[in-house]
């Protein structure tokens, strides 16, 4: 099976502006930002989407959320707030079949989201 775009970014086969990485997750700036701050946080493990995560993935998913909060703080969003978004499937806007969290901030968010 071929690698997803995000696996290639995590493996540094495709350049990206990294803002955080460790042995479990990689965070990088989105190339089509929807807010002044728009970062994607992905697990290194190729999980296609949240609906396909397994019970044994709970540790990496928890790690991803904790690192999202850490990245938000590093980027100056902790005081004003930020949004975390997971898309699951084409109707939700999923473009790459590799689980990823959108970290959005730097502006007032609307509710409900579009």
Image (cartoon, grey):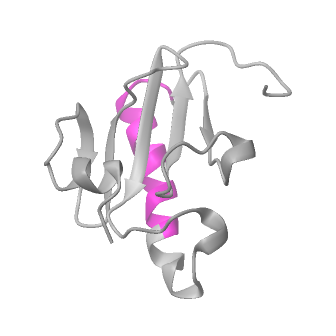
| Quarter occupied by residue 93 | top right
Number of marks in picture: 0
In the image, 34 versus 71, the foreground residue is 34
Q: Residue at horizontal 42%, vertical 23%?
A: 76
Furthest residue in direction bottom, as rendered: 56
Point out the image quarter for the N terminus. bottom left
Q: Is residue 75 left or right of residue 52?
A: left
| Quarter occupied by residue 17 | top left
Which percent across, then down, holds residue 91?
Answer: 75, 44
Q: Is residue 4 left or right of residue 64?
A: left
Point out the image quarter for the C terminus. top right
Q: Is residue 72 magenta?
A: yes
Q: Residue at horizontal 51%, vertical 67%?
A: 61
Q: Residue at horizontal 47%, vertical 77%?
A: 59
Which percent across, then down, holds residue 45?
Answer: 36, 70
Write the start and end of the magenta stretch as one range. 61-77
Q: Is residue 50 magenta?
A: no
- Seen in the picture, residue 61 relative to 65 is either above or below; the reply is below
Which percent across, then down, holds residue 19?
Answer: 27, 36
Q: State the predominant SS element of the stretch in magenta.
A: helix
- Seen in the picture, residue 19 relative to 35 is either above or below; the reply is below
Furthest residue in direction front, as rendered: 1
In the image, 70 versus 94, the foreground residue is 94
Furthest residue in direction right, as rendered: 112
| Quarter occupied by residue 29 | top left
Q: Residue at horizontal 30%, vertical 64%?
A: 2
In the image, 68 versus 74, the foreground residue is 68
- Seen in the picture, residue 111 relative to 36 is either above or below; the reply is below
């Amino acid at each position: 099976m071929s690698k997803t775009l995000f696996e290639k970014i995590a493996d540094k086969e495709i350049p990206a502006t990294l803002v955080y990485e460790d042995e479990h997750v990689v965070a990088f700036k989105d190339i089509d930002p929807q807010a002044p701050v728009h970062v994607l946080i992905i697990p290194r493990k190729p999980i296609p989407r949240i609906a396909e995560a397994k019970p044994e993935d709970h540790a990496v998913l928890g790690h991803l959320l904790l690192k999202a909060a850490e990245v938000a703080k590093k980027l100056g969003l902790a005081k004003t707030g930020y949004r975390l978004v997971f898309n699951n499937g084409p109707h939700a806007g999923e473009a790459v079949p590799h689980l990823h969290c959108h970290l959005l901030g730097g502006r007032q968010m609307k509710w409900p989201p579009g």
